[in-house]
Amino acid sequence: MKTRTTLALAAVLLGLGAAGCSSSGGTTPPGALPRPFGGVTHYDERQRAALHDAEEVLVTGCMRERGFAYRPQGLVTGDHRVDANPYGLLSGDQAADDGFGVISTALNLKQAADPNQDHDADQAWKAALLGTDAHQVTVDLPDHQQFYYNSDSCLTQARDTLYGPDYFRLFNTFQVLGNKVVSGVQADGRYTTAEGHWRDCMSSAHQSAAHLADPVAVIDQRVKQDGGDPAKTHDLIGGELSLAKTSARCQDQSGLAATVEQIQSDVEKTVLGTDQPLLDQLRGLRRQALARASHPSPTGTR
Amino acid sequence: MTIKSRIAKAAAATAVAGAALFTLVGTAPAAQAAPSGCNAGGLCVYWNANYGGGVQTVYQDNNDLSQYTNFAHSQGGSAFNNGNSCNVVVYADKNAQGQGWILYRGQGWTLIGDNLPTILSNRWCTV
């Protein structure tokens, strides 16, 4: 189904281009739209690729030192939803260029086959890559959550080199805290009032939607239903662009982004409490990792 | 956990318990890279914390995991990324909407809390 959908949609690729989607559409940074803690757990496309490639070089080197072959894998390309705002906020420019990024993703997504799949049953290979339970390290996170990793793995060795040993404790901590911020903002009365104004605006434009996520779900459903029918693809693309522009206009009219930013600032203070030093530390490690990724070690090993 | 999800978990636990027992028998290597029952290349979600109870695994991107009990009621369970080459991002909502949670390859959440009560969609290899 996915292949048929992609083929049918690809047939009208020029139509989408005429509607304003650039060949690299969807990679436009979300600009000033708010993210928890200034987006400390979010990396843009270029940063993601640099970090991933640097980590794969380090993993490959470690595996080689342990006597195993490892084939680096690139990230998937063409997923225009990766940078979607966690609150569902959408700028007018994004909407006009790429809609919600749903159909352009269907057009452009390129999945790569797992190059290491033939090692699935190789316990020694897996142990070198993932480590072993005798070296399991469990880390406590806020709200009674925990994560674990194996300290003897090539992945851990590579990540310690690239990010620093404390990065993942901090990253996971701020995944939890960032999620609390998003939930806190969306539960705030000021947000529900602004979203109500957006809903009224959408209704005036003859679009029924209770929450910001609903229009995206509508397009997803339409693609799932009609994406394989070439006769309907032109209407699908036009429908996404139109609905996205309406949603973005209504968000703008209701002042949603500014409201979210204001509430987010309040909620962050509560959620962060006395943990500002941890946030500063994570920001520092993030900067260092990006610098290392842009200037990788020639050998790729420690 | 809400009463509703508790009831749902209790009902579904019966359905997956047999699978868990079956999985545990005969797979006990001395030094495991991944939790027991978690197949290579997959994102495994367990019914209980600390990789106990039944396990359900996905290997590809999914927009709607609501039909998979462990994913639809992830709170109180656990998860492990046993991918060979990729990190995975999971979302509490369908269609990869909302705040994504990155579960790095070779890492696991030993206890999933109330801020990820459901895992309804996932994306591989995007981060």
Image (cartoon, grey):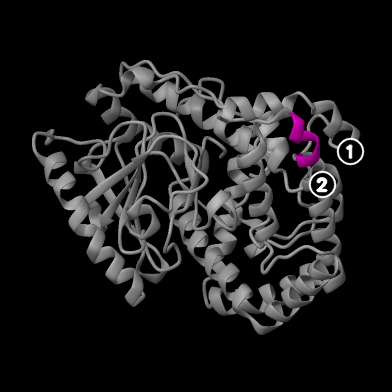
Alpha carbon separation for disc pair 1 and 2: 9 Å
Share a chain, discs 1 and 2?
yes
Q: Is residue B37 magenta?
A: no
Number of marks drawn:
2
Can you name the residue that lies furthest to the left here?
A: B25
Q: Is residue B47 above or below residue A250?
A: above
Three-letter code, disc 1: Gly
Q: Describe residue B111's horizontal placement relative to residue A11 as left or right.
A: left
**Magenta residue check for A234:** yes
Circle 1 or circle 2, nearest the eye: 2
For mark 2, give the secondary structure: helix
* Residue that appears at 57% across and 63% down: A279
At label 2, counting other C-alpha atoms closer than 10 Å, the crowd grade (few under 14, some 14-19, many 20 or more) is many
Residue appearing at x 79%, y 60% in the figure: A247
Residue under label 2, please give it: A241
Task: Residue type at mark 2: give it.
Answer: Leu
Residue A194: x %, y % from top left: 75, 77
The quadrant of the picture occupied by the N terminus of chain B is bottom left
Element class at badge 1: loop
Chain letter of disc 1? A
Q: Main secondary structure of the magenta part?
A: helix
Chain ID for label 2?
A
The residue identified by callout 1 is A20
Looking at the rendering, the stretch of residues picked out in magenta corresponds to A231-236
Q: Kindly indicate whether the residue at mark 2 contacts the one at mark 1 (C-beta within 8 angstroms).
A: yes
Viewer-proximal residue, B55 or A160? B55
